[in-house]
Image (tube, rainbow, N blue to C red):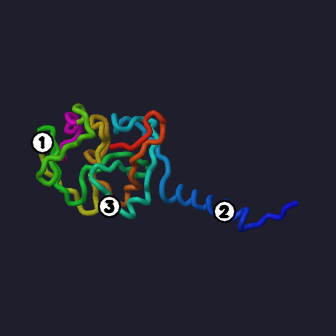
């Protein structure tokens, strides 16, 4: 009967297990898209990888797809306005700090639907407060976002989601 050598036989597996636990708990984990507020870029049932630790090393950027906490419920939205940005929707165009911003990820219906819900940035300039973010869904006709919920605190943003991992047919990065 062979004696178990802890350093050789057990320690490597414990290190691998520890790395997996750290990655799963602190760095990345799967999130499921619920609903149609991010169509057509994300669809109901997509599973994405949420990178939580990345926000500790880089700032939130305009266009990032983020997971945010709204009263204990997590939602997936796109960052439109950063702290101190001045936002305006006029003639189906988004202006940020006075310059037109092309939303390449939106289809024509989403652009037209942006001002159907709320008028906070439609025809009026709004300034995003310090340490707050303005988030919107890509399917503007059905998305419940900053237009109704208001600004999001930095602390309510859990992480950035850039990669679909399931279904396999949709595997890859999301714009």
Q: Quick check: 56 left or right of 116? A: right
Viewer-side residue, 162 vs 143 = 162
Element marked by disc 2: helix
Q: Which mark is residue 59?
A: 3
Bin the neighbour count of mark 1 within 10 Å (Cα to Cα): few under 14, some 14-19, many 20 and up. some
Magenta stretch contains residue 112: yes
User: Mark 1 and 3 residues: CB-CB less than 8 Å, in contact?
Assistant: no
Q: Which mark is residue 12?
A: 2
Residue 5 position within the rendered picture, expressed as x and y whole percent measured from the top left = 77, 66
Residue 92 position within the rendered picture, expressed as x and y whole percent measured from the top left = 15, 38
Lower position in the chain sequence, tag 2 or tag 1: 2
Q: Which residues are magenta?
A: 111-121
Residue at image position (19%, 34%) is 112
Bin the neighbour count of mark 2 within 10 Å (Cα to Cα): few under 14, some 14-19, many 20 and up. few
Lower position in the chain sequence, tag 3 or tag 2: 2
**Residue under pointer 1:** 90
Residue 155 position within the rendered picture, expressed as x and y whole percent measured from the top left = 37, 60
Placement of the C terminus among the 4 image quadrants: top left
Magenta stretch contains residue 25: no
């Amino acid at each position: 009967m062979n004696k178990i050598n802890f350093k050789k036989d057990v320690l490597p597996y414990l290190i691998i297990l520890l790395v997996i636990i750290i990655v799963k708990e602190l760095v990345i984990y799967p999130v499921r898209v619920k609903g149609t507020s991010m169509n057509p870029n994300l669809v109901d049932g997509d599973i994405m990888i949420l990178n939580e630790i990345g926000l500790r090393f880089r700032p939130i950027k305009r266009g990032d797809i983020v997971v945010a906490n709204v009263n204990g419920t997590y939602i997936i939205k796109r960052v439109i306005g950063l702290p101190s940005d001045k936002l305006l929707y006029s003639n189906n165009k988004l202006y940020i700090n006075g310059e037109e911003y092309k939303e390449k990820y939106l289809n024509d219906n989403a652009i037209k639907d942006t001002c159907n819900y709320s008028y906070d940035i439609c025809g009026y300039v709004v300034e995003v407060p310090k340490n707050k973010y303005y988030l919107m869904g890509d399917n503007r006709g059905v998305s419940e976002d900053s237009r109704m919920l208001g600004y999001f605190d930095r602390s309510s943003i859990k992480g950035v989601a850039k990669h679909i991992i399931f279904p396999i047919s949709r595997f890859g990065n999301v714009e």
